[in-house]
């Protein structure tokens, strides 16, 4: 069991509300951690409020989100483990690379700067925002069909529909533009300090059937860390899609993250 004071910060990604981490928070608390799952800057307290006020998150970029979580971490009693999903996984890597976290678990993490080859399915999901340049300053929502393609493709149709109704919210389009054009920007906010030799351990998790962040992206991400002697582990869950952190199989992924943190003495 982890020491009672060990904090864990959960970081959601685009199109999901922070409260979707609820089962993870409860599990980690029972395991002896001190978990918190704050939303991105501007995120409303509930799913319903977030849907009613999309402008509250419009225009927020990766740096805004990193700074937001850095301030939260600064108010904790100890350096936390950070666990992020999708763009939350990219944020988790930024925080780890800046030595603000003791360890990080990045689940189906959005591509960081340096990941060059993006599968067509990932481009299709990103195009939801990228097709209109004005979306850089807007909040963008998913339709049930888009959620089914990008998140729920490995689930029964009914479960995908239920997750969409329960957790989806409008999210800023700006991070998608920043990630898409990272290769053209030396100071891209999607850039992670992958060469940091003193950072804590990192676990990269991939869903074998993920269309939004296919395993090829996660494997390419891992290769970018080859210059650092710090621990970078990889785990793939066969048959799982981008919803693996919140669907009916979430516990398998959460237990794996718990086990890994325990093995890293966290």
Image (cartoon, helix red, strand yellow):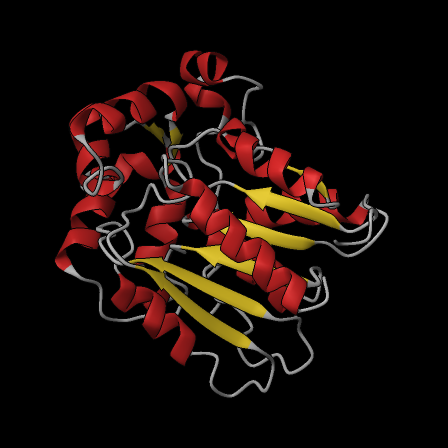
Image quarter of the C terminus: bottom right
> Where's residue 215, x and y in %?
28, 64
The image shows residue 228, relative to residue 266, as above or below, that is below
Within the image, what quadrant is residue 119 found in? bottom left
Dividing the picture into quadrants, the one containing residue 208 is: bottom left
Q: Is residue 182 above or below residue 72?
A: below
Q: Nearer the viewer, residue 161 or 254?
A: 254
Q: At which x and y percent is residue 250?
A: 43, 41
Residue that appears at 70% across and 66% down: 99
Q: Which picture quadrant has residue 165?
A: top left
Count all numbered tags in the image, as a single digit. 0
- Is residue 49 rendered to the left or right of residue 200? left
Residue at 31 percent across and 46 percent down: it is: 242
Location of residue 137 with respect to 124 vertically, above or below: above
Visible in this render: residue 193? yes
Q: Position of residue 140 (x, y in %)?
A: 32, 30
Direction from residue 234 to residue 25 in the image, left or right? right
Q: Position of residue 64 (x, y in %)?
A: 57, 44
The answer to whether residue 184 of the structure is visible from this angle is no
| Left or right of 44, for residue 114 | left
Determine the residue positioned at 48% across, 79% down. 225
As rendered, which of 187 and 71 lies closer to the eye? 71
Q: Nearer the viewer, residue 154 or 183?
A: 154
């Amino acid at each position: 069991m982890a020491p009672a004071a060990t904090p864990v910060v959960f970081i959601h990604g685009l199109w999901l509300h922070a409260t979707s981490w609820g089962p993870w928070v409860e599990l980690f608390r029972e395991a002896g951690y001190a978990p918190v799952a704050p939303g991105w800057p501007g995120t409303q307290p509930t799913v319903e409020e977030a849907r009613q006020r999309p402008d509250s998150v419009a225009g927020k970029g990766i740096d805004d989100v990193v700074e937001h979580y850095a301030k939260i971490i600064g108010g904790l009693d100890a350096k936390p483990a950070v666990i992020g999903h999708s763009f939350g996984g990219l944020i988790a890597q930024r925080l780890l690379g800046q030595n603000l976290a003791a360890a990080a678990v990045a689940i189906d993490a959005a591509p960081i700067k340096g990941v060059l080859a993006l599968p067509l399915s990932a481009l299709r999901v990103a195009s939801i925002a990228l097709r209109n340049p004005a979306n850089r300053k807007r909040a963008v929502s998913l339709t049930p069909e888009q959620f089914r393609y990008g998140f729920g493709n490995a689930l029964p149709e009914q479960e995908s529909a239920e997750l969409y109704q329960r957790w989806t919210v409008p999210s800023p389009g700006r991070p998608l533009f920043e990630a898409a054009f990272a290769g053209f920007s030396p100071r891209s906010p999607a850039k992670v300090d992958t060469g940091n030799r003193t950072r804590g351990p990192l676990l990269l998790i991939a869903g074998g059937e993920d269309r939004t962040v296919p395993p090829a992206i996660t494997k390419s991400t891992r290769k970018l860390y080859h210059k650092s002697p710090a621990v970078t582990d990889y785990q793939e869950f066969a048959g799982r899609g981008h919803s693996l952190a919140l669907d009916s199989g979430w516990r398998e992924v959460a237990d794996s993250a718990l086990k890994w943190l325990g093995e890293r003495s966290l």
